[in-house]
Amino acid sequence: MFHRGTSYLSVGQRDDDSAAPSSSPSSNGSFLRGIGCLILISCFLFLITPAPNNTHHNGAKVPEQLSPHRRIVDPRERTRKLPVRVQSLLAQSQIVGDHLQEVKDGSKTVEEAIHLSTNKQGSGIGSSAHIGAGALSRNVKSAPMTLNEILAFLNSFVKKLTASNVKNKHATFHGIWSAYHDLVAKHLYPWDQEYLRRMPPRRQDGSIYLSVVSFRDEFCVETLKDAFNKAKNPDNLFIGLVQQNCEDEKCRRGSNVGPDPDCYTLFCSSSMGKKYCNNGQIRLLRMKEAESLGPYMARYFASKLWMGEQWYMQIDSHMSFLQNWDALSIQMLEKAPSEKPVISNLPPPNTSNLQEKIAVAAPRLCGAVFATSDIEGQIVRLERSYNYDRIKLDTPRFAPFVAAGYLIAHSDMLRDVPFDPFLPYLFLGEEILLSARLWTSGYDIFSPTISLVGHRYERNQQPKFWEAIHMAFTNGVHNPLQMLVLNRIKQQLGYPESARDMIKPKTLLTAVEQYSMGHSRSLDEYLKIVGLNVSLKEVTYTAWCETGQPPPGFEKHNHLYNS
């Protein structure tokens, strides 16, 4: 029978049935109803009482998903009092749960909370703590991404970008940035972190990956042909081409003309290009003119087409080459007194006879100025390269800056100093930022010993990407949009007017730690060596670059340059 205890119900066995007292039918009915109520109450208590530590009463471990004691709680109960935007982020695994209360009480914004857990755990690459990582962390892969995987994702992202642009065509520059930020935070950034975690190992086969970004460039196909024709080892050359073209019947290029020349198709259909395309040595990402995000983001996309080649080189799409440029580039890198060399300058014009200049020392990029135009935000701009050396040495000389239109480096650069997906719409600032990030990450910058490439500088009548921005949105929106995004670069470089507490909106700082200065050397040390004072906007002449000597702190290499 059931015995009622003081704090629980227990089931006991009656020892002597014959000793049970007799009762009337009415009392038996009441007794049975009481028993029924007790049974219902005990079952209810049994069901709602959680089993401690997922352990059954007999000591056996019960799998959590099968435990009959677990009370299922609607997760919406915990978030109903949160703002709708935060609820949406939570539903899509796009917010760091550890900091939910801080978001709820207003001490941190959603954007500030995104990376706090990631930073506590280290680099955060592949971590489930960052924004949008929910789906990735549930299906962790370790093998390098295939080219098909990469292109499938990038093409999908570009389609989403197009839809977003159409939706926000009449938005203000703040609205354009907000839409882009949210799209990247939701899709591109989490994918980028997964890509960085799964990057292929660097090969040791003398291969060169050539990043080429083209914006409506009629000279692109000649650049590809010259690169392969002049290479000593063309079978070791792999090109990642980001082609941004107008594909309409009428395209603006001074006057209305037909579609832009298709660089990839023209090269691959040529007698010399067909072989390399069939061998998979040209990797292509097509983008329409209206989808352009500027040269920096085009280089971001091109960097993702790298498949482990030993050396990384990036150029513009209107270049010429010296015979055997590839082998000579590798020789320079190997002779530079550094474990992580980067060779760069502003090349001579493409009209120069590079073969005749082979006995002359290449020009070096030494100077920088703070921009004075109202639309440039006092960002650091690089000056021209000059011929400082009377004697050509075999050892590359140190230099303070890299030029985005021509550099070649150890390809671990893509792993150590990855391109930042939160820097769209820029034509300024990428070179000083990349120079500082490389140097603080342990990379040493050098000028080439001889000129290996020429650059077509006179392109006044060619289309410009900011014209495409005006077509995609509204006329005149590019300048204020660029000024806004420049604050992300200026904050990293230490501009006081772009300090963290000064920047608005705070979305400009999303994931900035993931794509900022390295930890091998300090930013202050770099700025002192190159003579830049970002607080006072002053440039100090340092002399070491112009005289061809190593910078302060690198005196151990002086003997290499005494001539």
Image: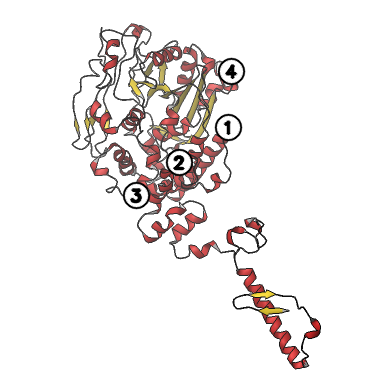
Point out the frontmost of discs 2 and 1.
Answer: 2
Say which element carries label 1: loop
| Circle 2 crowding by C-alpha within 10 Å: few under 14, some 14–19, many from 20 | some
Q: Mark 4 or 1, which is nearer the eye?
A: 1
Mark 3: few, some, or many residues within 10 Å (few <14, many ≥20)?
A: some
Answer with left or right where residue 407 lies relative to residue 555: right
Q: Earlier in the sequence, mark 2 or mark 3?
A: 2
User: Residue most toward the right?
Assistant: 18
Query: What residue is shown with label 1?
Result: 146
* Residue shown at the point (39%, 37%) measured from the top left: 515
Mark 3 secondary-structure assignment: helix
Three-letter code for the amino acid on which mark 3 is drawn: Lys
Q: Determine the CA span between mark 2 and mark 1.
A: 22 Å
**Residues at marks 2 and 3, CA–CA distance in whole angstroms:** 20 Å
Q: Which quadrant of the figure contains the C terminus?
A: top left
* Dot 2: element: loop
- Horizontal relation, residue 58 to residue 186: left or right: right
Distance from the alpha carbon under mark 4 to that under mark 2: 41 Å
Q: Residue at x 31, y 15 (%)?
A: 397
What residue is pinned by disc 4?
275
Q: Residue at x 35, y 45 (%)?
A: 508
Q: Earlier in the sequence, mark 3 or mark 4?
A: 4
**Of residues 39 and 324, which is closer to you in this image?**
39
Q: Give the residue at mark 2.
A: 124
The answer, for residue 249, to whether it is visible in the render is no
Horizontally, is 556 left or right of 413 in the view?
Answer: left
Q: Nearer the viewer, mark 3 or mark 4?
A: 3
Residue 258 spot, x, y in % from top left? 48, 32
Mark 4 vs mark 2: give the one in front. 2
